[in-house]
Image (cartoon, rainbow, N blue to C red):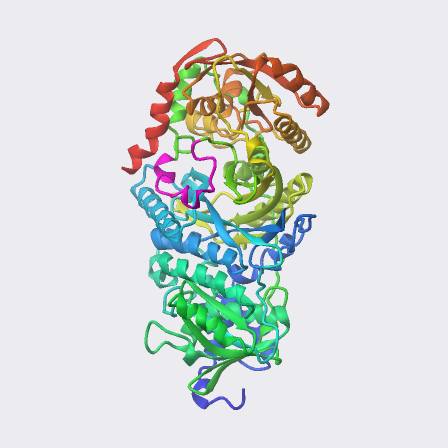
Amino acid sequence: MASMNQSISNQLTNVDTAKKLGLTEDEFEKIKQILGRTPNFTELSVFSVMWSEHCSYKNSIKYLKTLPRKGSALLVEAGEENAGLVDIGDGMACAFKIESHNHPSAIEPYQGAATGVGGIHRDIFTMGARPIAALNSLRFGDLSLPHTQHLVKGVVKGIGDYGNCLGVPTIGGETYFNECYNQNILVNAMSIGVVKVGDTVSAIADGPGNPVFIVGSATGKDGIHGATFASADLTEDSADDLPAVQVGDPFQEKLLLEATLEAIKTGAIVGMQDMGAAGISCSTSEMSAKSGTGMRIDLDKVPKRQKDMLPFEILLSESQERMLIVCHKGKESLLQEVFDKWDLECELIGEVTDSGRLEFYTQGEKVVDVPSEDLVLGGGAPVYDREFTEATYFAALSKFNITEINDITDVKSTALQMMSLPNLASKKWIFEQYDSMVRTNSMHTNDPSDGFITRLKGSNKAIVSSVDCNSAYVYADPYVGAMIAVSEAARNIACTGARPLAVTNCLNFGNPYNPEVYWQFVNVIKGMGEACEMFDTPVTGGNVSFYNQTQLAGKVEPVYPTPTIGMIGLLHDVDHRMGLSFEKEGDVIVLLGENKNDINQSEYLRNIVGQSESPVPHFDLKAEKSLQETILTLIEKDTILSAHDVSEGGLVFCLLESAFKNKLGFTVRCADEIRLDALAFGESQSRIVISCKAEKLEELSQVASQHGVPLQKIGSVTDGSLSFQDQDLGSIADFINIFDKTLDTHLN
């Protein structure tokens, strides 16, 4: 560095500069020790993004490492690649991952959501897998607020436009509304892809002397300090950070997708990584650190959309639709030919070195000289273990007494009220804006099931996926609530006939420096880990999103802890897929699992009664495992006709959803001697409603008995009339009308 021009040396920094870039005083001192000198502004900017929470996981990695990360089906362990990779047989693998784009979506909902979709798909095809499906998990505030309606419309349009133009079907997801997300919404996007085993590409920079290319779009000033932006609280002034939100182009991404997959086949690529968070800074440092090498990069050769971009702007830009590729020396022309064919930038910007350092030049001057290993997670990036204390609200929840709540007498009137709750109402307004049938692999659109089914062309197999998290449960008990999130994802997949394989997660929390928030985080990790162990679904990766907070009543409050679980399973024979809909009048309706005298954290209690403070619903992890083994056995034996898990809205809502598609009805009477509201609308876990032919009931009972799972025949399917506990609920058409129109009322 002594040879650097005086003009660069004059950019030396101090602790105030570091704090403005989101670094602490201690971190600034550590950087000085690593370099043996004071960093210049460009170097400090690189450290600031690479050591941000978004890139380094400095406040979470200690606990993330405790999650189960190995399994017989895994082809790579968590963190080894851009996405998880699972063996699905026949020489094929499934790559999948979920990530957040929360802060950008809260500021600019259309581009924030669109670029979240683009980024997660790039993580998949960077590995050489073709994306075949997308899912999402969305959290918004009070739907009656104009601001929330604006955010919903922008996010949904952004997701739909990007995915539809790219040609990847958006097959499913979940959407919740709660005032804790009024300002800080959550947008979690998941992508699933397939690739031949052995045809994947790693994010490595092996071979000193190998050339380094940047491909795809040109670099602009959008998204600068996006990683830092995502690692800080949203405030009233956050709109001023709009340049930190990237701008996407799905048509460019489609070209990049096809060019990338074609380039891999040439054999010219050593390693490749998407330029997501922190842009060139991240891809160069992570690839180099993984290989124990370095890079020498000429920033003047980076294609730019704007003139006079400063070095730190080029390095930190998060402009979309870009990749960094290390090419085998001597095969540059093969790479160039492919990207020329697709009319994309493919520029040689540097080479791999054996120095272990990143050296960036502009106009012949070295502006950055830092060791790559010290920038990244697992290297020199700091790791913290924050203090935590039990949340002050937690003990108070146990004081809830169900006897102080008046029981209902009229099931119908309550059910009609609940049907119009945004969390329970049809999300038709949302999913009709997504193309779910492009590539013709989706199988559940006209025949709904608990899991989302994507057929694997050329075989009779299918990938079944789910995204799940009831954050109200997690708020009530982070440990048990996280178990429930994993269990419901696995239950949805099992009810579809597939066996769960693996998990990716998106962990959304408030400020980690808040001891109560960190207590939530630590307990979520513990509960998630135990549930994943039980279902043999190792965690393949994902991301952590801290600093999600909302101003309520003049006070800044963290959002509910929201560990979104993305799970995949394998259905070996699509002819054995199981739907959730009742099939025919006269079929028997059976409940697997046990009803409880429990209305804790139910939609009924929180939104009809108006009581938000209560414990988590009843849950037993071992009982859940037995339940899922039972349903898988029943489906394998062709014993049942439908299966639908009891979740939000309780038993009555589950029955109604099973009746909707074929406009059938039900006559149900349970033998349980419990409160009527708990029976109808309680959300105690580990229950599945199934239908079958009467002659199959004995076989069904034997299977349930073998697994120790309670079973109760509760009724039969009707021609459209509805009865519950001898109360006439009217016709199914009455409920469908309300179910379908609730979101339309707010958003049209």
**Total marks placed:** 0
Q: Residue 538, percent across and down?
A: 65, 47
Q: Is residue 596 left or right of residue 586?
A: right
Picture layout, residue 695 above or below residue 626: above
Residue 370 shows in this picture: no
Q: Which of the image's four quarters has the C terminus?
A: top left
Q: Main secondary structure of the magenta part?
A: loop
705 or 455, nearer to the observer: 455
In the image, residue 442 lies in the stretch drawn in magenta: yes
| Residue toward you, 443 or 108 | 443
View extreme (left): residue: 748
Q: Tell me which residue sits at (40%, 56%) in the image.
A: 115
Image position, residue 338 (x, y; %): 45, 68
The answer to if 21 sits in the magenta stretch is no
Q: In this picture, is 401 found above or below 204?
A: above
Residue name at image x 58 percent, y 59 percent: 200
User: In the image, residue 373 lies at what x, y percent?
Assistant: 61, 72
Q: Residue 450: x and y, percent?
A: 51, 33
Which region of the structure is painted magenta? 428-446
